[in-house]
Image (spheres, grey):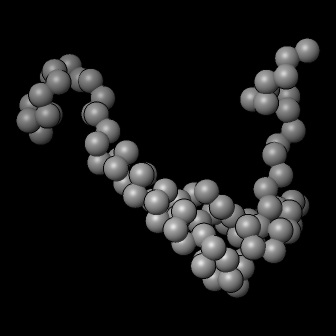
């Protein structure tokens, strides 16, 4: 049997609130941090309570994501690789 965690038949991974630890199942929908997308929270109260612990890692990951988007190479087109030609 294949032990790959990306199997199609594998059950969905359960996420937990980074602050209180409540599981995001059934009627509890966890929301991701909008800056870094690394952690999830059950509500604004938990997000605010956890901010002091999360702040440094969040800002670092958010900067990495901005750089990825900024320096991402454009897809190739029929016009060639010249970014000016793509205008």
The N terminus appears in which quarter of the rendering? top right
Report the residue at 79% width, 30% height from top.
5
Q: Position of residue 9 (x, y in %)?
A: 85, 28
User: Can you see residue 31?
Assistant: yes
Q: Residue furthest right?
A: 1
User: Can you see residue 8?
Assistant: no
Q: Position of residue 83 (x, y in %)?
A: 14, 34
Q: Quadrant of residue 63?
A: bottom left
Q: Position of 27 compared to 65: left or right? A: right
Report the residue at 24% width, 23% height from top.
77
Q: Is residue 73 above or below residue 66?
A: above
Q: Is residue 75 above or below residue 35?
A: above
The C terminus appears in which quarter of the rendering? top left
Q: Quadrant of residue 7?
A: top right
Q: Residue furthest top?
A: 1
Q: Position of 49 compared to 8: left or right? A: left
Q: Position of 85 compared to 67: left or right? A: left
Q: Position of 67 compared to 21: left or right? A: left
Q: Residue furthest left?
A: 84
Report the residue at 17% width, 24% height from top.
81
Q: Position of residue 52 (x, y in %)?
A: 60, 79
Report the residue at 83% width, 68% height from top.
21
Q: Position of residue 39 (x, y in %)?
A: 66, 61
Front-most of 6 and 54? 54
Front-most of 57 and 2? 57
């Amino acid at each position: 049997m294949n032990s790959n965690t990306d199997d199609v038949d594998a059950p969905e991974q359960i996420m937990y609130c980074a602050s209180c630890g409540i599981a995001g199942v059934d009627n509890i929908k966890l929301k991701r941090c909008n800056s870094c997308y690394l952690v999830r929270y059950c509500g604004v109260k938990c997000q605010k309570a956890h901010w002091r612990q999360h702040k440094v890692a969040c800002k670092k990951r958010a900067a990495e994501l901005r750089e990825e988007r900024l320096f991402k190479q454009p897809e190739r087109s029929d016009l060639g690789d010249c970014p000016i030609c793509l205008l």
